[in-house]
Image (cartoon, coloured by chain):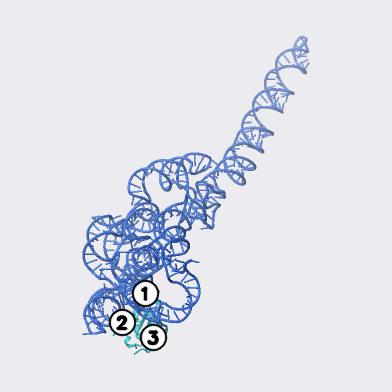
Chain colours: A cyan, B blue
Amino acid sequence: MFELSRNEILRDFKIVHAQGKSFANRDLVVYILRDEKFAGKVGFAAGKKLGNAVTRNRVRRLLREAYRLNKNKISSDCAIILVGRKSLIDAKVDTAIKAFLEICRRAKILL
RNA sequence: ACAGGCAGUCGAGGCAAUCGCGGUUGAUUCGUCAGUCGAGGAAAGUCCGGACUCCACAGAGCGGCGUGCCGGUUAAUUGCCGGUGAGAGUAAUCUUGAAGACAGUGUCAUAGAAACGGAAACCGCUUUUUCAGUGACAAGUGGAUAGGGAAAAGGGAAUAGUGAUUAAAAACUAGCUCCUGCCCCCUUGCCACUGACCACUAAAAAAGCAAGGGUGGAAAGGCGCGGUAAGAGCGCACCAGCUGGUUGGUAACAGCCAGGCUUGACAAACCUCACGCGGAGCAAGCUCAGAUAGGAAAGGGUUGAUGUUGCUCGCGGACCUUUCGGGUAGAGCGCUAGAUUUGGACGGUAACGUUCAAGCCAGAUAAAUGAUUGCCACAUACAGAAUCCGGCUUACCGACCGCCUGUCAAC
């Protein structure tokens, strides 16, 4: 029930990024697009500003974990992109989860 | 013990539980379940070299690029190993971009007289000439003085004669002697003036010098003795360099002998010489599927489109460019069993090679290693595979092991 399989991974980043609504706080940015075509898909990103490949990998894994543990609290009719920010580099999973849920509440996609 | 040098090893700290990810194997009631493997020494920078793929068969010349002591090693290299020269260090050891500067062209700022022409004279050293000064001195001229010689002249005494006769005297004459002594001559010292030559000093001119000073990164082999007017490889000894011979070494080179005496640096300036290099790169490239779909229009094309390297040749030989309107951007192969990993034996100083045994050790494609909790020694740097290997370079917390050198102490 907490799995994250291959076909849940988003491929069409450009469409979601361009057409989706964005929500942000101190720790992350979330793009949300309600579309049946991409329903239930998710993508994770970390820009080059965050640092080298190791730190970017770490941020992506944090986002992945935050989504994985909470995906059943979210409506599955939309595509989501999570983008990490600098404050997440040294953060623990708790802060990422808090930030993610806070944004979901604002976007009204919580079940 | 301290100081130093060389070479190497480890490194998401480990364990447990729960949730989760990629590959793969097996089972399956096709929902899943179980097993197993899963980032690095640099995965990095992309600086070299290859493998592999496509481009005639990978070709020729010019150009271009690279390399540059010698030998070896390798698939190959700007790598590595061994050696030589030079430099640094007491030493172990380290550094080295190390062909050619009498084939040519060029550069050497500032300073300095002069920066490669066998050049250049600023101070300086030396010779000659001219002029001036100083000193010393031969000599000359003049002056005063002293001594000597000679001696005009004067004077005195005595003598002789005349007088000169009886006897005498005055007077006269004579020479000798004595005294004074002009002019003249000689000598010594003194004073004044002149002063050849010599020495020194100053100036000017002409010539010689490359020793010394000074400038500079560098001043035309170094240093000493001789030599010289002063100097100079001008001569000699030693050292450095060059050329030739010879011995050793595969060679770089080293040793010895002889020679004439000597050639600045820069080639990471152009250049010369030798050797090497075809180009593009896994988004290479191949296959399948799919789309009204092997579209349409214009232009150029076998008198050569286009490709092959920048140019020329040679080779191949039918498409190419632009615009319009669309479509696909999915899957598989390439892709990980290899110049492979570990261990041993043998050969080699070594790099490395040969061989035997055992093993399989990431293969993703929005891209897999994470999260939480607890315990332990409590502390983690640089950092994340994308076709693969061999090197180089750079980054780095902390630790460990071995060998070697020097100093001190003890024996």
CB atoms of marks 2 and 3 within 8 Å: no
Location of the C terminus of chain A by quadrant is bottom left
Give the quarter of the image for residue B125.
top right
Q: CA distance from mark 2 to mark 3?
A: 20 Å
- In the depicted structure, whether residue B203 falls above or below residue B343: above
Image position of B301 (left or right of B127): left
Regarding residue A33, the answer to whether it shows in the image is yes
Chain letter of the residue beneath label 1 in the structure image: A
Q: Which residue is mark 2?
A: A5
Count of marks placed on residues: 3
Residues flagged by tags 2 and 1 on a common chain: yes
Q: Nearer the viewer, residue A99 or B146?
A: A99
Q: Amino acid at mark 3?
A: Ile
Per the image, the residue denoted by label 3 is A32
**Location of residue B344 by image quarter:** bottom left
Of the numbered discs 2 and 1, the one sitting upstream in the chain is 2
